[in-house]
């Protein structure tokens, strides 16, 4: 199964005579299973140049209808390869294949959704105060966009960026995380099979050096980044110095709020899904569970019982409900956060250790972990863990729940569980987050816009609004008066 990959530039696999490589490690077996190229500055520059040439010579002249057909074909090919791609992704990042398989189809849905918009990029006409004048706007692509994705859901995160970028008429250079690059490199071949012209879609891989080169090796017109706030801030600073606009989808410390009048079974199931799906390695994880005091003991008892029943195991096994942590640095970080939470005074309700067992082998498994007696000032309540660790905090009133929910530097997602419609509507207005789920959690749809506030970033992915990230508005003013407008005439 071991494979050595090459970069994908101008619809070709490329490598240099002295190409540097690094290892892809299976987080379940801890074995090297692929070799990934570290792109040089020159190769990054070549990729940007290929994208620029493709845009100027071909893609800018391709109609929305033709772009749409290519995107629909890409969706078909991705679905046809869903099983293989899911196997590769679960091998690369340890996520349970029951989730990665579904993500291939949701990614295909994104390409279909935006394909339907590719030929509908209309402008507007604007009435002016000037007689005998006509004014209208054009919505045009930016040109070359850099798309940088994270390791937790490579194909899903890529579709959030690539689908609107292509629909808007841009060419792209994609950089996946060095911790999970395989499916993105494989995806490039699917795009070539779909018939995309040379240079429209390019993939370069590597560590932070590749990311830096993408901002410094040629003119690009947009950077879209998914990852940590610290890295996002550095990218925004580098891009800002070059006046390059950015879209940032960063971290979260999302509150999942259960009121006493909530449907208990639905709310507790939603709490489990919110934090333990994808091993908690998702920016929208409901990692702070706010529970009204009258039911907090009952809720903790239920979710702790259910957490112990979650089946850990080989990510490629369909019966596995929770896979591994994606890589060794993240694994160590999660365990350190758990120990720090204990030292801060949080009470461990369940979990809290490296998970071990016959079916777990050497893998980076962490037990589903729940802490109670958490204060919102604690690091566990303020900093993103990006792992299967839940902080439970009680509240008494609606106003207190809002205060706790908003008392964080993040503002990505949130959930509210209540049967009181008036309360639900008040909470949607009061919570300072880009997404508010009511009586559901961690549900994503291609047509619903997604993006955070505060340190969770800015800009939108998914939904019609995502197109605005990849378009610019040009104003056109026409004077059709017969007489000459000469303000200096005598």
Image (cartoon, rainbow, N blue to C red):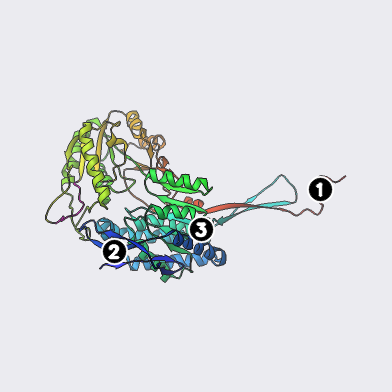
- Where disc 3 sits, the SS reads strand
Image location of residue 127, percent across then percent down? 67, 48
- On residue 396, the disc is none
Residue stretch rendered in magenta on the structure: 359-367
* Numbered disc in front, either 2 or 1: 2
Tell me the SS state at disc 2. strand
Q: CA distance from mark 2 to mark 1?
A: 70 Å
Q: Quadrant of residue 175?
A: bottom left
Magenta span contains residue 362: yes
* CB contact under 8 Å: marks 2 and 3: no
Left or right? Give the position of 43 relative to 475: left
Residue 105 in view in this figure: yes
> In the image shown, does 131 or 278 lie closer to the viewer?
278
Judge left or right: residue 462 versus residue 339.
Answer: right
Image point (32%, 36%), residue name:
382
Pointer 2 residue: 34
Q: Are marks 3 and 1 in contact (CB under 8 Å)?
A: no
Q: Which residue carries the number 3 mark?
A: 144
Q: Which residue is mark 1?
A: 486
Label 2 environment density (alpha carbons within 10 Å; few <14, some 14–19, many ≥20): some
């Amino acid at each position: 199964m071991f494979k050595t990959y090459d970069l994908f530039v101008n619809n070709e696999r490329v490598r240099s005579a002295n190409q540097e490589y690094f290892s892809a490690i299976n987080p379940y077996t801890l074995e090297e299973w692929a070799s990934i190229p570290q792109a040089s500055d020159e190769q990054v520059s070549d990729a940007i140049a290929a994208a620029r040439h493709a845009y100027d010579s071909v893609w800018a002249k391709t109609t929305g209808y033709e772009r749409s057909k290519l995107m629909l074909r890409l969706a078909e090919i991705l679905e046809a390869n869903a099983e293989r791609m899911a196997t590769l992704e679960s091998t690369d990042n340890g996520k349970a294949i029951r989730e990665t398989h579904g993500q291939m189809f949701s990614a295909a849905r994104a390409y279909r959704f935006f394909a339907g918009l590719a030929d509908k990029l209309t402008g507007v006409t604007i009435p002016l105060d000037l007689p005998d004048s006509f004014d209208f706007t054009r919505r045009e692509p930016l040109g070359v966009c850099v798309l940088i994705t994270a390791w937790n859901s490579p194909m899903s995160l890529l579709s959030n960026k690539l689908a609107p970028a292509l629909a808007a008429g841009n060419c792209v250079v994609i950089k996946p995380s060095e911790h999970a690059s395989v499916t993105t490199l494989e995806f490039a071949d699917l795009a070539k099979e779909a018939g995309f012209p040379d240079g429209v879609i390019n993939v370069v891989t590597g560590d932070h050096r590749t990311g830096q080169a993408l901002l410094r090796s040629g003119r690009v017109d947009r950077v879209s980044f998914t990852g940590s706030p610290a890295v996002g801030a550095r990218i925004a600073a580098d891009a800002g110095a070059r006046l390059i606009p950015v879209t940032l989808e960063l971290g979260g410390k999302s509150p999942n709020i259960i009121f006493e009048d909530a449907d208990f079974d639905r709310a507790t199931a939603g709490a489990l899904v919110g934090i333990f799906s994808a091993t908690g390695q998702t920016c929208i994880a409901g990692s702070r569970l706010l529970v009204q005091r009258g039911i907090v003991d009952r809720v903790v008892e239920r979710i702790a019982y259910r957490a112990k029943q979650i089946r850990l195991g080989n990510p490629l096994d369909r019966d596995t409900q929770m896979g591994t942590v994606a890589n060794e640095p993240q694994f160590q970080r999660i365990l350190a956060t758990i120990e720090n939470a204990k030292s801060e005074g949080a009470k461990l309700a369940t979990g809290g250790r490296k998970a071990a067992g016959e079916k777990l082998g050497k893998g980076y498994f962490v037990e589903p972990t729940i802490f109670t007696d958490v204060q919102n000032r604690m690091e566990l309540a303020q900093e993103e863990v990006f792992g299967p660790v839940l902080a439970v905090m009680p509240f008494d009133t609606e106003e207190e729940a809002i205060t706790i929910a908003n008392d964080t530097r993040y503002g990505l997602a949130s959930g509210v569980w209540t049967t009181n419609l008036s309360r639900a509507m008040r909470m949607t207005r009061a919570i300072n987050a880009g997404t508010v789920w009511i009586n559901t959690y961690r549900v994503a749809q291609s047509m619903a816009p997604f993006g955070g506030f505060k340190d969770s970033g800015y800009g939108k992915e998914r939904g019609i609004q995502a197109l605005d990230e990849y378009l610019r508005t040009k104003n056109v003013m026409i004077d059709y008066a017969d007489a000459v407008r000469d303000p200096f005439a005598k």
